Image: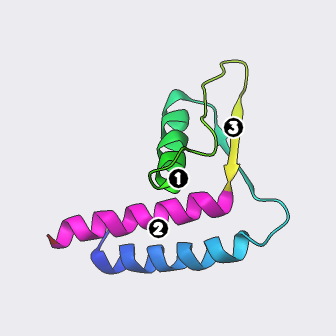
Amino acid sequence: MTKQEMQIASNLLEIASDTYSNHGCNDFELPNTQETIDFLNAMEKWSAQGGEPEQVHVFDPLRKTVNTYDWLLMKYLAARLNEDQAKETA
């Protein structure tokens, strides 16, 4: 992605995150893979900002999917886009 595309995507995700955080149901379904669990744990650690994560995800081979907050997912991805953009300009 170009710097401009990353900035636009980040801004849109921030706006959407704020809107979605006010919805009654904020679940987003992802495939239950170890990669997804690692991703969700990284997101939870990021959102705790030095504190303890709200929850720790553990891979359960009996489940096909896992749920997370859609608004938190958007906020995290926006931050990651901003990190990637900062790396490009450094």
Q: Distance between the residues labelled 1 and 3?
A: 20 Å
- Residue range highlighted in magenta: 70-89
Q: Position of residue 70 (x, y in %)?
A: 67, 59
Instruction: Return the residue found at the far left.
Output: 90
| Amino acid bearing label 3 | Val
Find disc 2 in the rendering and name its residue.
78
Q: Position of residue 28 (x, y in %)?
A: 70, 52
Amino acid at dot 1 = Ala
Q: Mark 3 points at which residue?
A: 66
On the picture, is 60 further left or further right than 36? right
> In the image, is residue 19 part of the stretch drawn in magenta?
no
Q: Is the magenta stretch mostly helix, strand or loop?
A: helix
Colouring used for the render: rainbow
Label 3: state its secondary structure: strand
Name the side, left or right, on which 81 lies relative to 58: left
Q: Residues within 10 Å of mark 1 (few under 14, many from 20)?
A: few
Residue 89 screen position, x and y as percent? 17, 73
Comes first in the chain, label 1 or label 3: 1
The spot of residue 24 in percent (x, y) is 85, 65
Nearer-the-camera pick, 76 or 7: 76
* Gap between marks 2 and 1 measured at Cα: 16 Å
Asked if labels 2 and 3 touch by Cβ distance under 8 angstroms, the answer is: no
Pointer 1: what residue?
48
Earlier in the chain: of badge 2 and badge 1, it is 1
88 in magenta:
yes
Look at the image and tell me in which quarter the C terminus lies.
bottom left
- Residue 1: which disc? none
Seen in the picture, residue 50 relative to 59 is either above or below; the reply is below
Please give the name of the residue rendered at 37% of the width and 73% of the height, measured from the top-left corner: 6
